[in-house]
Amino acid sequence: MKDKRVFIVYLISVFLCIFVVYGGCIFQFLYKNSINVEIKETVLMEVNNLSTSREKTQKLAIWFNESNIKYVPISDAFFNFFRYPWCLNTPEMTFFTRKGRCGEWSSLFMKMLNYTNITNRAVRFVEDHDIVEVLVDGNWVPVEPSGGISSFDNYKTSKNISKAFVIYDDNKQLDVTINYAETGFLSVRTTERKIISSNSKVCVFSKNLMFSDSKNYKKPFLSYCNYTNEFGIHVENIGKGIYDIEALKIHSPFECSYVKIENYILIPNTVNKIDLELISENPFSCFIKFINGLIFS
């Protein structure tokens, strides 16, 4: 009898796990088409009698307000838990639940724009934020649909952005940092025992805050990683702000050199030159870095 109860509990647990992971997928399979019809009808109703791309974009941006869709705070653990499965994080589910944050709102906004045949593209900031650019009168105009504070042709941030990328459907990226931040060049040169260290991995972490709410700041965001050339140099165009910079050279799984500087202040409109002298690490630390490189490279 006890074994039977254990088996029943096991089956219920498995069913619940399957439902949590695939319930949204099943729902979308059944209702995706009808939800898309509702999205299209909403768009056509909003842009009815509007003729220009500018007017239509403005009207759809205004649709994103608290009466139509709720902005979910970062602290909402329940929403966070269900946010990332691939079949839940879709424009259709966002429209159905009427909840989301910048990523969900941007995806839904782009889908709505597609029903008007207005060209658009996603822009992602390294400091964890998404917006949409819309092609209006031959110019790419940034639109901020999220947070119930929609803006059109008047996009503003604190300008503390390290990198901004356009993300295309084929996962290709276009660097558009210069459009959103005051930038400067960061030139990093790595040496090891006073000798040029080519092919060293340089990673830069942003400690910038895009917005004034410091409560949302958790840890530095990875801005980029790249390798030095044959002269031990790598140059990157990056937004002004405060950064942690790391350099690593792996010689073998148990032999490496590493250095880190913290709170480097990048000055815009100039070339910021940094010389980093790599220092030998202990074998255990090298092995951890080697494994991390295999996993996250």
Image (cartoon, rainbow, N blue to C red):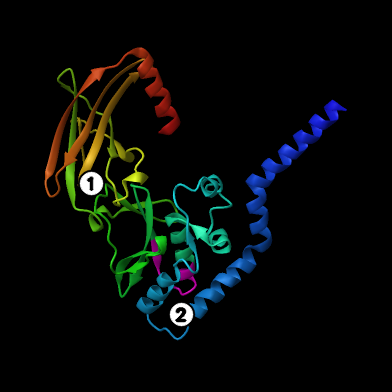
What number is the disc on residue 89? Answer: none
Residue at 66 percent across and 57 percent down: it is 27
Horizontal relation, residue 143 to residue 49: left or right: left
Q: Is residue 97 left or right of residue 101?
A: right
Residue at the top extreme, as displayed: 283
Q: Amino acid at mark 2?
A: Val
Q: Which residues are magenta?
A: 112-121
Question: What percent of the width, then of the height, locates residue 295?
Answer: 45, 30
Q: Secondary structure at mark 2?
A: loop
Q: N-terminal of the two: label 2 or label 1?
A: 2
Query: Percent from the top left, x then y, of residue 237?
Result: 21, 46
Q: Quadrant of the N terminus?
A: top right
* Dot 1: element: strand
Task: Say if 179 sits above or below 7 in the image.
Answer: below
Q: Residue at x 32, y 38 (%)?
A: 220
Q: Quadrant of residue 50?
A: bottom left
Q: Position of residue 177 (x, y in %)?
A: 26, 53
Q: Are marks 2 and 1 in contact (CB under 8 Å)?
A: no
Residue 230 or residue 151, whichever sits in front: 151
- Which residue is rendered at x = 34% and y = 67% of the image? 151
Specify few, some or many for label 1: CA neighbours under 10 Å numbering under 14, 14-19, or 20 or more. Answer: many
For the C terminus, the image quarter is top left
> Who's the residue at 44% across and 48% down the image?
74
Corner quadrant of residue 33: bottom right
Residue matched to label 1: 238
Q: Which residue is mark 2?
A: 47
Using the rendered image of the protein, determine whether residue 104 is visible from the camera's viewpoint: yes
Say above or below: 196 vs 89: above
Residue 200 appears in view: no
Three-letter code for the amino acid on which mark 1 is drawn: Ile
| Mark 2, other Cα within 10 Å: few <14 / some 14–19 / many ≥20 | some
